Amino acid sequence: MIKNNYTSVIGLEIHIQLSTKSKAYSADENIYGANPNTKISPISLAYPGTLPSVNTKLIEYALKLGISLECDINKKNIFSRKNYFYADLPKGYQITQDKNPICKGGHLLIDLEDGSKKKINLTRIHMEEDAGKSIHDIDPYNSLIDLNRAGVPLLEIVTEPEIRSSFEAQSFVNEIRKIVRYLDICNGNMEEGSLRCDANVSVMKENDKDFGTKVEIKNMNSTRNIKKAIDFEIDRQIELIEQGKFIVQETRNFNALTNATNSMRTKERADDYRYFTEPDLQPLILDEKYIQSIANDLPLLPNELERKFKKEFDLSSYDIKLLIEDKGISDYFQKICKIIKNYKLVANFVNGPIKSFLNTNSVPIDKLPIDRKKIIALLSFVDNKKISISSAQQIIFPKLLNSDLEVIEIIEKNNLFFENDSIDLEEIISKVLEKYTQKVIEYNEGKIGLIGLFMGEIMKITKGKIDPKKINTELKKELEKRKK
Amino acid sequence: MKISNELISQLSKLAKLEFKEGDFFAIKNDLKKILAFIKVLDKLDVSDVEPLSHISTEINILREDLIIDYKCKKSAMTNSPIKDSDYFKVKKVIKKLDKR
């Protein structure tokens, strides 16, 4: 395949909107979805004579991310103006950082398809502010401008061009998203634009020394679309080169309906942003003590947590991945495991019914309408073999969601305790096997799938009153006896 | 520094100014004079002077993360020549997208 002769070279620029209460350089509220132009101030509207001042949280959040990604922290920060003209940028410039970003270098470990990890180096992370929002598709003659977003604090993360596939790009964004949510500095919501990603993509022949001409792709508002857009772009570029054509350096927009990228504007000459020092903001000098205090307050991050879970709980990589997707979930899991020592049971219950409820209702774990004590009570009944896991999942859990009943009340009302002593299991098994003599022969000849049929029959009769594991063991014994 | 017609047209684009082709000669001359005037500074030896980024020596002027509701939508909108009840309006600033 021709594609195999090419290497793709990808660098990402990720913007994260910080979840501060107020904006980066002014005190108007930073909130998504408010009525248009209600969260504005003379400063964010760039009225003459106004003076910006830096939000403490902007610095704190930048340091949190920078320290977590092991960047070099720049102690002397000055802000710069990046000048460009657009209707949703009232000042005519964006306050950003140019030559001395707050974080330099750093790296992130990402998951590869084969389960191994790859280190992606970062170029920089810098602080800046968002522009307002232009809406082009409502009024046929005009663009509508909403300035609520103007001045919202952003961190821009720039990677080295070390990403080699759309999968790696997607994995990188997933990992960044997880980390900013663990750090509680950004909600990571790509649909709302709280986390945005642009990709610089080029391709080169396997043995080439120089990178090919790069194309910037914008407007990929989900990690799935990032993968699709990059795949499309790689194919498009290889096809052009194979046809002997040139690749134009340009910005292309991803269209989620067609899964294609379309040309937005050509970058004939690099944009001239005329950066210069922002005279309205004084230098920011960070001392070691402050940086250290931020470092000391950091939570365990997903990669560290993954190692910890492997060591402490002895769970499969798959279980662990699910548990550490979200900080709320991993905290919850650890709290339950302080009491219930059957970690696999807890992992299954959290990743199973609890997560499925949260996903269906799109709520975080702290909105689960069941007290954690009740979940612990429920799981200890299962762990002590007093009730079956299926009763816990299918009967008790839904009832806990919809009532204030205690676990024990639900178990008693529905008669769910195992009654290992009062039921003659041996007799029931014999009856069922007699009913299916032909099937028993087939089973013993090798159709072992038939065990499901016997189990089902027995379970129907015992009505979940006997531990399925016990039934399974006894049933196998009986079947063994019937072997000639 | 060579002051070409291309430079003038690029600067006029960035400055959002429009010149007639016939004005280029005069503008080029003006710009040459301005640059020559500034060039006087090159005579100074500043090799051991750290660039000055700010006049004041104050540092770390920070603000707590607190919200102020300025309630200024109405007054801000009164300054806009085209608008509706919610939005500022400007002439369409995007080319028609491809048919979706």
Image (tube, coloured by chain):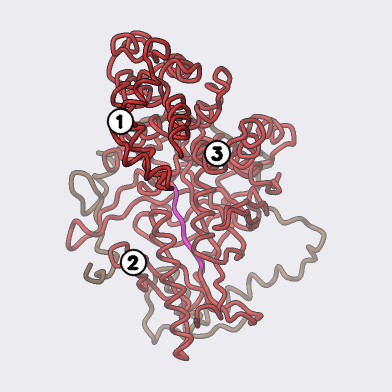
Image location of residue B95, percent across then percent down: 27, 70
As drawn, the label of residue A457 is 1
Residues marked 2 and 3, same chain = yes
Give the CA distance from mark 1 to mark 3.
35 Å
The residue that disc 2 covers is A259
- Residue type highlighted by circle 2: Asn
Report if residue A453 is visible in the image. Answer: yes
Judge if badges 1 and 2 mark residues of a common chain: yes
Q: Which of B57 and A115 is in front in this view?
A: A115
Q: What stretch is highlighted in magenta?
A: A195-200
Residue nearest the viewer, comparing A480 with A236: A480
The answer to whether marks 1 and 2 mark residues whose Cβ atoms lie closer than 8 Å is: no
The answer to which of A182 and A3 lies nearer the viewer is: A3
Checking the image for residue A271, the label placed there is none
Who comes first in sequence, dot 2 or dot 3? 2
- In the figure, the shade used to draw chain B is brown
As helix, strand or loop, the secondary structure at mark 1 comes to: helix
Q: Mark 2 against mark 3, which lies toward the viewer?
A: 3
Identified at 36% across, 14% down, the residue is A423
Figure check: A301 above or below A207 = above
Q: What residue type is labelled 3?
A: Ile
Residue A27 image-quadrant placement? top left
Main SS class of the magenta portion in the image: strand
Tag 1 and tag 3 share a subunit: yes
